[in-house]
Image: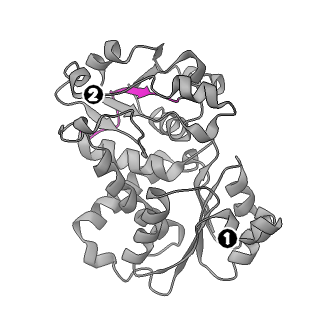
Amino acid sequence: MRSLIDILELSVEELDELIALAEDIIANPAKYQESCRHKKLATLFFEPSTRTRLSFEAAMYELGGDVLSMSSAGSSSAAKGESVADTAKTVSCYADIIAMRHPKEGAPMVAAMNAGIPVINAGDGGHNHPTQTLADLLTIWREKGKFTGLTIGLCGDLKFGRTVHSLIAAMARYTGNRFVLISPEELKLPSYVKKDILEKNGIEYIQTTDLEKALPELDILYMTRVQRERFFNEEDYLRLKDSYILTPEKLKKGRADLSILHPLPRVNEISVGVDADPRAVYFKQVLNGKYMRMALILKLLEVEV
């Protein structure tokens, strides 16, 4: 039995296998529609979510399985003080696999250590979000046809952005990639990510506060929102929330083959005027997330199709 807590738990070969499986699901959906019949996914979400929770549930339904859903901590025994470990042991009696989102870093790992079934980390605090990274990787693959030799701009909240940390960890394993880290001083990428991933592996990166200056050199622009829920001080959030707003005017400086990604939800960091630009692929990214979660569920449940 295997869980997925961190994207680095998957080898490059396994990532390639998951992408190939997702591509086959896209091409041949009927082939997979009964593959998880009589299997149950439990979605345990202790934090709000739209895309992640619904895409996990849609993924399981499209595989022919069923879903047990807990959409908030207040609707579970966590409100009575039940531990994550006990919740995981309990849910293991009812389901075949768990997808868990939790505001505390490490909570899904505790669940995986105590559950008798696979656990997928669906986001833990500012730490990891491996299935969003799987969605990002499939999107990059479908748009660029490669994972190597890319200049990747990451813009916005690089300090608390768990999607950013996971994507850097994944893309750092492929050769020839360089990163442009675009953020206010207060929201720079944590030093441990720079040291343990980028510098340790000799990967080129630059830090800047200027999005418009960086745009012309980017193959991929990964926008993020400034996350109100990660701030202790409302004044700091209000001061930083509009640091970067991508508009059609600014995009004139971007390459014709630029791909604009965003893990969503957006607030106002991407103007709705950008949505019609063919370089905007963030809603394709949403759909790709469903296909990669379908592939991951099949892998962790060891279902052969």
Quadrant, the C terminus: bottom left
Pick whichever of labels 2 and 1 is earlier in the sequence. Answer: 1
Q: Where is residue 264 in the image (x, y as percent from the top left)?
A: 42, 45
Residue 122, compared with residue 159, is above or below; it is below
Q: In this view, does 33 lie to the left or right of 76?
A: left
- Give the residue at mark 2: 247
In percent of the image, x 34 and y 16: which residue is there? 214
- Give the residue at mark 1: 75
Residue 11 magenta-drawn? no
Quadrant, the N terminus: bottom right
Q: Position of residue 297 (x, y in %)?
A: 48, 67
Magenta residues? 144-157
Q: What residue type is labelled 2?
A: Thr
Q: Alpha-carbon distance for marks 2 and 1? A: 40 Å
Asked where in the image residue 261 lies, by quadrant, the reply is top left
| Number of residues whose C-alpha sits closer than 10 Å to that of mark 2, classed few (under 14), some (14–19) or many (20 or more) | some
Q: Is residue 131 left or right of residue 152?
A: right
In percent of the image, x 50 and y 29: which residue is there? 241
Q: Position of residue 282 (x, y in %)?
A: 32, 45
Q: What element carries label 2?
A: loop
Residue 24, compared with residue 106, is above or below; it is below
Residue 216, compared with residue 224, is above or below; it is above
Q: Are marks 2 and 1 in contact (CB under 8 Å)?
A: no
Residue 28, compared with residue 104, is above or below; it is below
Observer able to see residue 78: yes
Q: Is mark 1 on a helix, strand or loop?
A: helix
Q: What residue type is labelled 1?
A: Ser
Q: Is residue 14 left or right of residue 152?
A: right
Between 270 and 142, the one lying in front of the other is: 270
